[in-house]
Image: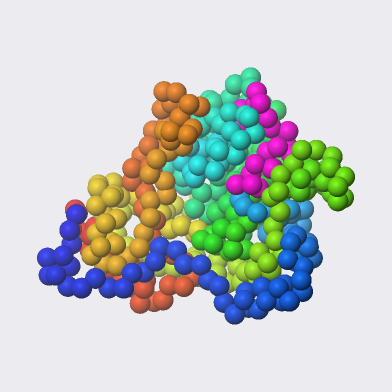
Amino acid sequence: MNSSRTKEHSPVPELIPAAKPIIGDEEREAVDRVMRSGMIAQGPEVAAFELEFGAQLADGRVAIAVNSGTAGLHLGLLAAGIGPGDEVIVPSFTFAATGNSVALTGAAPVFADIELETYTLDPSSVEAAITPRTKAIMPVHLYGHPARMRELRAVADRHGLLLFEDAAQAHAATLGGTPVGTFGTFAMFSLYPTKNMTSGEGGMVVVDSEELARRVRLLRNQGMERQYANEVIGFNARMTDIHAAIGRVQLTKLAGWTAQRQANAARLDREISGVVTPVVAPRATHVYHQYTIRVENDRDGFSRALRDEHGIGNGVYYPIPNHRLESLASFAPDLDLPNTETAAATVLSLPVHPSLTESDLDRIVDAVNTVATAGA
């Protein structure tokens, strides 16, 4: 797919990155404060970050900081009692960490289809996937859009199942005014550098009871709450005070960044054409971790043209569904997930991050419209 820029041999503008972590002077000062304190490992900064995160993003639920989002999913599942012989229903259209975390407990990930409009779990596909071994359902709030939690809760309740949330990409997203991360027994938020807020690396597990919180805390710290009093076999999944200090600063900026993402997305909604733009479900608040379009004819060529001819960074999240990955395919022999396959073949994420200028947005709109017209 070629647009007029290639034919004219005009220079490619400087690349607008698909994602851009924002680390400023306040974050650097926070790290310096921790370094001067001498308390580097899990300590008072982590404790403060947990309280602030739970209060701001999870309606006051208990939050437990860990060293990655994947660790958060793994420990949350273990703490909730998931293990060998169990099945957990998850989407196939997501990052592999979702299915990996289930498999790491010894349980089996069971892949269900998505709704193509929002890229989140289809409750009817979930219900069709339930077996006598099913223990839980774990939707993903993909790209920052909430999954259909009320319908999934109804499915879970009808079948006596637990409900968890992979909220890795959905900080501050809501459904009917209720924050994601507060619908299930536990939820995980990722704090990876490209997420809507970061701690440099890390994750946050949000839980619905102090009993579950204690189990997660034990598992993250070699099975002990008191030094050398190991109660269970655990891991080293602690967050450092350095990372927590970064996260605390980022948390104070999240609301403004989210509003900017939403404003950027609104402009793209209004002005780009020739592609399928994101849908926001009724009563849902989308926080646009990604602004994901669908290109129904030669998505990969469209992606290359945006990048190589127009300097617009972009990404495909995710080109291979989990049920077809070599690492996870054994859990899903002969599985047919048509909406998942359509999404994997057609999605393309454009820059939407808060660092974009009006000039950047002009370029993105013009590039998408030009490439869409060239491919028409």
Q: Is residue 296 left or right of residue 291?
A: left
Residue 164 at x, y = what percent? Answer: 65, 41
Residue 17 at x, y = what percent? Answer: 39, 66
Residue 144 at x, y = what percent? Answer: 53, 54
Q: Quadrant of residue 285?
A: bottom right
Q: Residue at x 84, y 40 (%)?
A: 231
Q: Which residues are magenta?
A: 70-89
Q: Residue at x 70, y 28 (%)?
A: 160
Q: Is residue 289 left or right of residue 344?
A: right
User: How many discs mark residues in the rendered view?
Assistant: 0
The quadrant of the rendering that contains the N terminus is bottom left
Q: Is residue 66 left or right of residue 198?
A: right
Asked if residue 73 lies in the magenta stretch, the reply is yes
Color theme of the render:
rainbow
Residue 48 visible in rendering = no
Residue at the extreme top of the image, as rendered: 132
Residue 85 visible in rendering = yes
When the figure is inspected, residue 326 is found, relative to residue 228, above or below; the finding is above
Residue 87 at x, y = what percent? Answer: 61, 27
Q: Residue at x 71, y 73 (%)?
A: 35
Asked if residue 301 lies in the magenta stretch, the reply is no
When the figure is inspected, residue 234 is found, relative to residue 169, above or below; the finding is above
When the figure is inspected, residue 244 is found, relative to residue 317, above or below; the finding is below
Q: Residue at x 36, y 73 (%)?
A: 360
Q: Quadrant of residue 334?
A: top left
Q: Quadrant of residue 249?
A: bottom right
